[in-house]
Amino acid sequence: DTGVSQDPRHKITKRGQNVTFRCDPISEHNRLYWYRQTLGQGPEFLTYFQNEAQLEKSRLLSDRFSAERPKGSFSTLEIQRTEQGDSAMYLCASSLPLLEDEKLFFGSGTQLSVL
Amino acid sequence: TQLLEQSPQFLSIQEGENLTVYCNSSSVFSSLQWYRQEPGEGPVLLVTVVTGGEVKKLKRLTFQFGDARKDSSLHITAAQPGDTGLYLCAGANNNNDMRFGAGTRLTVKP
């Protein structure tokens, strides 16, 4: 399977704990996006990378959130000192550069529940 | 504030009925995309519309891009229970990243 994969699918944690999610994009895609989605809403943009460079970060993203894509392949999203409001589905997507092909391919997401 | 406004937010219809959902913005987009999302899964791309006034058909689904490239519509003919899902529109903004509307949640009852 050469689609976008995310790990874990589900994560339950206690408030104040740190969590880390992983995303493996489609191999030839140099763009990688992180979105957050809550029930009944569309995906909310968090950040995106082109290769290893983080080109944009949403101002909604607090300092507790950090994302990396060290070698331009897989990416990690870390949330420190989780809060109950962080509970959401975290979606990763990858694409070729939008000017070439504007298709986003999404993974199945990581569902985070903060107790 | 949503860059893209979708309406209606919820829609529940009987199998066999027709429906139209809308995606509107005050911004001009180089293209708009429509995705469908099922519970517990990521969105899946249905179509990309690029040219103002463009109409694309995908079986029973008809997508239209407004002449001014600020709005789009999705029309489904003879809806089936398998069409149930969250329909999202998305467009690339000035920073060249994709932003989504809040979606229309469609339920088709058998």
Image (tube, rainbow, N blue to C red):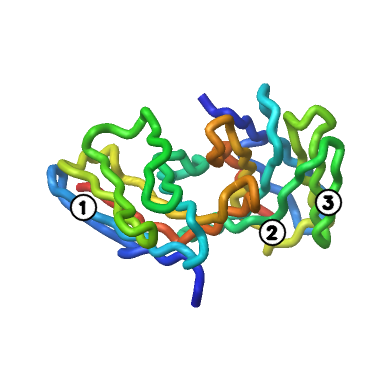
* Secondary structure category for the residue under label 3: strand
Residue type at tag 3: Lys
Dot 1 falls on which chain? Answer: A
On screen, residue A22 above or below A63: below
Observer-nearest residue: A93 or B108? A93
Q: Residues within 10 Å of mark 2 (few under 14, many from 20)?
A: some
Residue type at tag 2: Asp
Q: Position of residue B16 (x, y in %)?
A: 82, 57
* Secondary structure category for the residue under label 2: helix
* Secondary structure category for the residue under label 1: strand
Dot 3 falls on which chain? Answer: B
**Residue at the location (19% across, 53% down)?**
A13
Dot 2 falls on which chain? Answer: B
Residue type at tag 1: Val
Q: Where residue A19 is drawn, which disc sits there?
A: 1
Asked whether, in this view, residue A4 is left or right of residue B13, the answer is: left
Q: Where residue A67 is drawn, which disc sits there?
A: none
**Residue at the location (76% across, 32% down)?**
B69
Are discs 2 and 3 located on one and the same chain? yes
Residue on which the image places disc 3: B56
For the residues marked 2 and 3, what is the alpha-carbon distance in whole angstroms?
Answer: 18 Å
**Residue at the location (53% across, 40% down)?**
B97
Q: Residues within 10 Å of mark 3 (few under 14, many from 20)?
A: some
Asked whether, in this view, residue A96 is left or right of residue A58, the answer is: right
Q: Position of residue A32 (x, y in %)?
A: 45, 52
On screen, residue A101 above or below A5: above
Sooner in the amino-acid sequence: mark 2 or mark 3 = 3
Residue on which the image places disc 2: B83
